[in-house]
Image: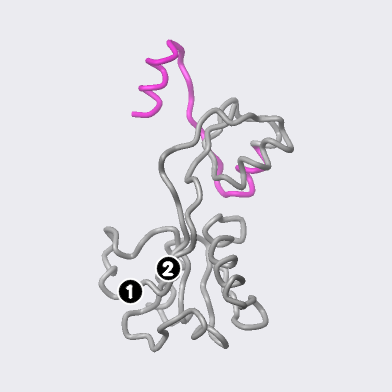
């Protein structure tokens, strides 16, 4: 639907493509493989610096990081993560950065106060506490959304919000 809308608006054919992972997407953006980029704010800044892309628009959508735990977890506040394991999405994910900044603002540091367990994606990180692989997980998705096991999770903390997507050309 987005492609059809854009094609109709500009009166030209276009192709929408992405990359298999965030690193490849960042590299392809840097290398100029895309004419227009819909990207997260931190990748938008890199596109400005590395490839002279310019911001065209910012979506109304805002994103934040959610730190979740199993409902039966004894954790009640962020400081309870001391000595525990936190499952996170890849380090390049904005929600990972937002969660770690939230923890730093509370005087906590990965490696010193808690252990990070990097997961392949946000869903794996969010559901890691339910699998017993971690004490808490980080995601950009609220477990209160439409996930099957949402009733087994609770929110321990939310980070500040940042723009969700920036459109670059």
Residue 128 on image: x %, y %: 44, 74
| Magenta stretch encompasses residue 75 | no
**Which residues lie in the magenta part?**
1-28
Q: Is residue 24 magenta?
A: yes
Q: Residue at x 39, y 59 (%)?
A: 141
Identify which residue is drawn at 52% across, 59% down: 95
Mark 2 surroundings: few (<14), some (14-19) or many (≥20) residues within 10 A:
many
State the image coordinates of residue 129 (x, y, percent, origin top left).
42, 78
- In three-dimensional space, the C-alpha distance between marks 2 and 1, rounded to whole angstroms, equals 9 Å
| Residue 19 vs residue 112, the one in the foreground | 112
Q: Which residue is mark 2?
A: 126
Q: Residues within 10 Å of mark 1 (few under 14, many from 20)?
A: many
Q: Are marks 2 and 1 in contact (CB under 8 Å)?
A: yes
Indicate the position of residue 103 as horizontal and vertical percent values: 57, 72
Q: Would residue 31 appear left or right of 152 to someone viewing this image?
A: right
Give the farthest residue toward the top: 11
State whether residue 133 appears in this view. no
């Amino acid at each position: 639907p987005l492609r059809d809308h854009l094609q109709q608006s500009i009166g030209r054919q276009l192709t929408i493509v992405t990359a298999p992972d965030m690193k490849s997407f960042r590299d392809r953006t840097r290398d100029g493989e895309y004419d227009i980029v819909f990207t997260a704010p931190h990748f938008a800044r890199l596109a400005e610096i590395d490839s002279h892309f310019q911001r065209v628009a910012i979506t109304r959508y805002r994103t934040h990081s959610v730190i979740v735990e199993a409902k039966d977890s004894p954790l009640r506040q962020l400081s309870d993560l001391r000595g525990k394991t936190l499952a996170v999405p890849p380090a390049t994910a904005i929600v990972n950065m937002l969660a770690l900044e939230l923890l730093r603002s509370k005087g906590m540091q990965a490696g010193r106060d808690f252990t990070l367990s990097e997961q392949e994606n946000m869903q794996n990180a969010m559901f890691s506490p339910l699998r017993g692989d971690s004490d808490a997980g980080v995601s950009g998705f609220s477990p209160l959304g439409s996930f099957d096991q949402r009733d087994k999770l609770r929110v321990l903390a939310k980070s500040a919000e940042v723009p969700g997507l920036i459109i670059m050309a």
